[in-house]
């Protein structure tokens, strides 16, 4: 017989620091907004959450508790449902669209849940309105790492936008567990094991009859873990606790705790154990579901012994069953039999509608062996999960479906599909080979399927394979499986998209006809507007983009609601050469953030490079290295060597523009050396672009001309080289400056005849400028004037400044020095802001030739009375002194807020001030 344990005191022993942190969260005088508690299992995090919930209630907060669970992790929005249930009565009062969104998340609407950003916005509005009506809210989140990914993404967005006053977020997670809160920047406090004095006091307080020697033995073995301190004495009898009997042998702590939990759970009545097992498998703790699954049995009566044992409790606000410690759930599972778990999963499946995701997942968990019907249902759930934006969950589900497949053909197909998703979306490229081996082992006949071909092609292109082999593989597989019913439409589209990228990177004209033929065959019975748009706007923009721009613009408009990362990235890809990337930024940032949170890595890499492309074109050059570096790190980690080439190109083109020729030419050489043996001709185009821009910056027009002339024939815009739209302005300048005026004129005539200017204002601006440059004898400067006056030209500062430079050069040579100076100064100012050093030198040289004195900023100091600031620093400092924020300054000067902040960090020591408040006085003294 064990000695009884004394009741728990109101406070926690040895947790004064943590309790003070919690108190501060709810103190009106110093109210915080969020706190993450971390620590090892059993260190007392859940007890601190319980104390926090009590303090919050006492302070007038409405407390909402969310608990992550192992089974619930696979059920979309199960975590979010715990937030919405206690606030359900507030939902109908929301705007109709937001109310419908949240009801869909709760499963109370026939509509599919909206994309995560819309759900996040709806949740934030719900919380805001609830706080306004009921008073401040507290979200208490236990085990966030076990939340399902969609809920985690939504709650992560909520946590990032927490503001003091109306909402407090308090969470607890095991040390080392990654969760949606890991990257939010909220304060984190690690709960340490108790020191020896506190541990001794805790055991003495709760087990007063225990002798000091036994107590010391337990304190030593528990190593400060409060859960172990409280649980280790439980199996000891009275004689052992009072030294009248031998103590048991010492076991590893984790094993000991498992044994303890098993003993405590095993001592419960059988009916209570069954209820706890049902609750673990159900995942959300919904007592209504549990009661229905138990055929109306009195759940609370069954639950009583577990509550009295301190293993579980019922949240009075939500009515949900809560386990006091995750190890209790583990013990419940360990004590159950496989047959019991299967039976209960079947019972739970009956509580959900036919075809619903939760029903299918319970059926899959109940399956004791191959079950083709359940496998087919789970296959459908996998693609629903993917369309919802959870690519990792989709892959996991697809693998489970393959395990349940009875036939080798079906198993092989599903394994091959998993390989495709892994290669093209989730970032599991390194596992592709083993998945394909297993697929072909299960179904040798399916070795030529589109799924196998698409996965193998991705592996080939990122490894030691070549474009020709990948092209043959894909074309053969698609042609032989294009008939309706032979292959899942999702996989056919994946194979076609992979083939499109093979054609693009090969840069071969003879590769595209097979793609077009395959697309025509497939689209006859499986229409896909996005695929057609990508082919036209990205594959051959010069000749085909105009016809699909309206459809593309509609697709981009729909990105606010799109959740599928594939469609977001591919829509943005279609916008690359037709200047539609700015409208894709928000959606691409969501995809990038999903990758950071453990989601789809491959699409996140593409999103990073698309955002970097947009930042380069828009003059946000300081953002380009951050975006490319993160994407390239992922490429290296996950072996995406071909995807990495796009990031390398952006690094190289930025280096060329800024005059870092060593980096630029090194990148160009590496692109050639890796791409040439693999037949990836587009990488040579990238390399030539970098070399040409580097040469133009240094006024080496002959070198630039040779690079660009080697890529094609003047007057032709090859249908297989979409990058020609990024090169025609460079070619016109280099050809005109080297005396090849006829070639320049012929080429720009082809650009205009193809309708390129009607694609976007930027391309119209560049076409006018290129035509003006190509005609050196033109007296009328209308084309230059029209280009420079293009509405919104400031959105493309580098292109616009280059046009200003070219026009200024033309005017200076025409002896119009005054007019030339205006444009040259505008060019110089923009180049300086961008950090385009070689272009600064070109503009400055032209200004000097116009009779304008241009000097490099001289070194200055506070002592000599001259301003120690550069012109740009002076401008930023003056704006900051007026009270403008970094964001407002950035908007005025077409800089990024990060660049403004960096300049101000340099300004403060130069002016001997420590904050913005001192800027006005410092600047006034210098001008006095």
Image: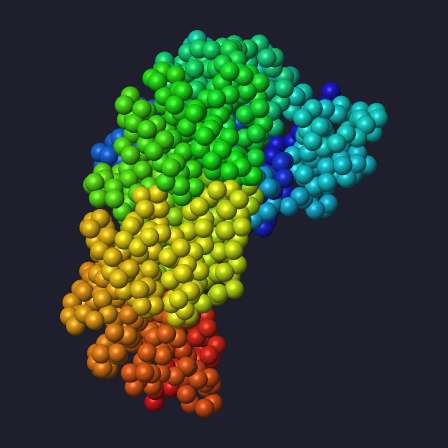
Q: Is residue 690 left or right of residue 132?
A: right
Say if residue 135 shows up in the picture: no
Q: In this view, does 307 lie to the left or right of 613?
A: right
In the picture shown, does residue 590 fall above or below 700? above
Which of the two residues, 678 or 312, is positioned nearer the viewer here? 678
Check the picture and name the quadrant holding the N terminus. Answer: top right
Residue 616: give x, y in percent of width and height.
37, 57
> Which residue is at 29% across, 50% downward?
716
> Which residue is at 21% across, 53% downward?
752
> Which residue is at 31% across, 24% downward?
521
Residue 152: give x, y in percent of width and height.
44, 37
Which of the two residues, 89 or 479, is positioned nearer the viewer here? 479
Q: In this view, does 637 lie to the left or right of 516?
A: right
In the picture shown, does residue 693 fall above or below 178? below
> Which residue is at 24% across, 34% downward?
97
- Number of labels in the image equals 0
Say if residue 174 shows up in the picture: yes
Which of the two residues, 439 or 82, is positioned nearer the viewer here? 439
Residue 300: give x, y in percent of width and height.
48, 17
In the picture shown, does residue 443 fall above or below 907? above
Q: Quadrant of residue 699?
A: bottom left
Which of the two residues, 421 or 268, is positioned nearer the viewer here? 421
How is colour applied across the structure in the image? rainbow
In the picture shown, does residue 375 fall above or below 173? above
Q: In which quarter of the image is residue 477?
A: top left
Q: Quadrant of residue 739?
A: bottom left
Residue 780: give x, y in percent of width and height.
15, 70
Check the picture and name the quadrant holding the C terminus. Answer: bottom left
């Amino acid at each position: 017989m064990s000695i009884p344990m004394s009741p728990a005191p109101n406070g926690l022993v040895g947790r004064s620091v943590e309790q003070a942190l919690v108190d501060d969260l709810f103190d009106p005088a110093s109210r915080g907004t969020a706190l993450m508690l971390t620590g090892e299992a059993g260190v007392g995090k859940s007890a601190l959450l319980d104390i926090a919930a009590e303090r919050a209630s006492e302070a007038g907060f409405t407390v909402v508790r969310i608990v992550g669970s192992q089974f619930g992790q696979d059920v979309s929005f199960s975590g979010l449902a715990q937030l919405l249930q206690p606030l359900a009565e507030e939902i109908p009062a929301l705007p109709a669209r937001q109310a419908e969104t949240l009801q869909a998340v709760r499963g109370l609407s026939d509509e599919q849940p909206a994309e995560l950003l819309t759900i996040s916005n709806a949740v934030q509005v719900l919380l805001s309105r609830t706080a306004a009506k009921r008073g401040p809210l507290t979200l208490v989140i236990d085990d966030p790492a076990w939340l399902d990914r969609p809920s985690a993404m939504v709650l992560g967005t909520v946590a990032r936008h927490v503001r003091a006053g109306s909402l407090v977020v308090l969470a607890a997670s095991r040390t080392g567990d990654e969760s949606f809160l890991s990257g939010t920047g909220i304060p984190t406090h690690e709960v340490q094991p108790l020191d020896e004095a506190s541990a001794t006091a805790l055991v003495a307080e709760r087990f007063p009859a225990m002798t000091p020697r036994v107590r010391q033995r337990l304190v030593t073995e528990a190593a400060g873990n409060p859960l172990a301190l409280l649980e280790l004495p439980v199996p000891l009898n009275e004689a052992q606790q009072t030294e009248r009997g031998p103590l048991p042998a010492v076991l590893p702590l984790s094993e000991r705790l498992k044994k303890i939990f098993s003993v405590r759970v095993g001592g419960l009545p059988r009916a209570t154990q069954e209820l706890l097992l049902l609750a673990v498998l159900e995942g959300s703790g919904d007592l209504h579901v549990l009661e229905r699954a138990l055929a109306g049995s009195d759940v609370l009566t069954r639950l009583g012994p577990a509550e009295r044992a301190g293993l579980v409790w019922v949240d009075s606000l939500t009515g949900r069953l809560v386990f006091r410690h995750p190890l209790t759930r583990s013990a419940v599972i360990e004590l159950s039999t496989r047959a019991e778990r299967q039976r209960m999963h079947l019972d739970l499946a009956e509580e959900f509608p036919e075809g619903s995701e939760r029903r299918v997942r319970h059926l899959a968990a109940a399956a004791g062996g191959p079950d083709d019907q359940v496998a087919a249902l789970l296959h459908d759930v996998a693609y629903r999960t993917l369309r919802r934006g959870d690519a990792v969950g989709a892959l996991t589900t697809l693998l489970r479906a393959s395990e349940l497949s009875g036939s080798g053909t079906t198993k092989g197909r599903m394994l091959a599909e998993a390989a495709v998703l892994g290669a093209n979306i989730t970032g599991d490229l390194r596992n592709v080979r083993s998945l394909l081996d297993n697929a072909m082992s299960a179904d040798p006949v399916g070795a030529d399927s589109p799924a196998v071909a698409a996965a193998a092609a991705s592996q080939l292109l990122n490894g030691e394979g070549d474009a020709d082999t990948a092209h043959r593989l894909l074309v053969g597989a698609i042609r032989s499986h294009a008939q309706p019913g032979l292959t899942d439409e999702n996989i056919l589209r994946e194979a076609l998209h992979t083939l499109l990228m093979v054609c693009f990177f090969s840069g071969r004209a003879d590769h595209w006809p097979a793609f077009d033929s395959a697309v025509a065959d497939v689209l006859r019975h499986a229409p896909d507007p996005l695929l057609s748009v990508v082919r036209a706007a990205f594959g051959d923009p010069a000749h085909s983009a105009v016809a699909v721009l309206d459809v593309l613009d509609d697709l981009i408009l729909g990105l606010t609601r799109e959740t599928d990362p594939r469609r977001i990235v591919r829509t943005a890809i279609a916008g690359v050469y037709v200047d539609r990337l700015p409208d894709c930024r928000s959606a691409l940032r969501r995809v990038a953030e999903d990758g950071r949170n453990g989601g789809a890595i491959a699409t996140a890499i593409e999103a990073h490079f698309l955002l970097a492309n947009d930042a380069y074109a828009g003059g946000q050059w300081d953002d380009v290295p951050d975006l490319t570096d993160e994407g390239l790190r992922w490429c290296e980690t996950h072996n995406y060597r071909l995807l990495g080439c796009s990031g390398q190109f952006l690094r190289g083109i930025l280096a060329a523009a800024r005059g870092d020729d060593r980096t630029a030419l090194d990148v160009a050489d590496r692109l050639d050396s890796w791409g040439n043996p693999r037949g990836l001709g587009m990488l040579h185009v990238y390399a030539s672009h970098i070399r040409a821009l580097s040469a133009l910056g240094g006024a080496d027009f002959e070198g630039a001309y040779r690079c660009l002339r080697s890529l094609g024939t003047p007057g032709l815009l090859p249908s297989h080289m979409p990058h020609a739209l990024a090169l025609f302005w460079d070619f016109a300048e280099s050809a005109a400056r080297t005396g090849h005026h006829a070639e320049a004129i012929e080429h720009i005539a082809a650009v205009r005849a193809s309708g390129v200017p009607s694609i976007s204002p930027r391309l119209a601006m560049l076409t006018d400028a290129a035509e003006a440059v190509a005609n050196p004898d033109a007296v009328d400067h209308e084309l230059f004037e029209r280009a420079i006056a293009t509405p919104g030209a400031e959105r493309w500062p580098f292109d616009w400044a280059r046009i200003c430079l070219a026009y200024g050069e033309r005017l200076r040579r025409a002896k119009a020095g005054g007019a030339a100076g205006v444009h040259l100064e505008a060019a110089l100012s923009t180049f300086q802001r961008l950090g385009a050093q070689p272009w600064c030198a070109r503009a400055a040289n032209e200004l000097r030739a116009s009779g304008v004195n241009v000097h490099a900023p001289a070194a200055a100091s506070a002592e000599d009375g001259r301003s120690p600031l550069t012109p740009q620093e002076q401008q930023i400092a003056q704006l900051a002194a007026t009270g403008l924020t970094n964001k407002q300054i950035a908007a005025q000067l077409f800089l990024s807020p990060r660049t403004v902040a960096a300049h101000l960090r340099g300004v403060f020591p130069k002016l001997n001030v420590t904050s913005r408040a001192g800027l006005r006085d410092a600047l006034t003294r210098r001008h006095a």
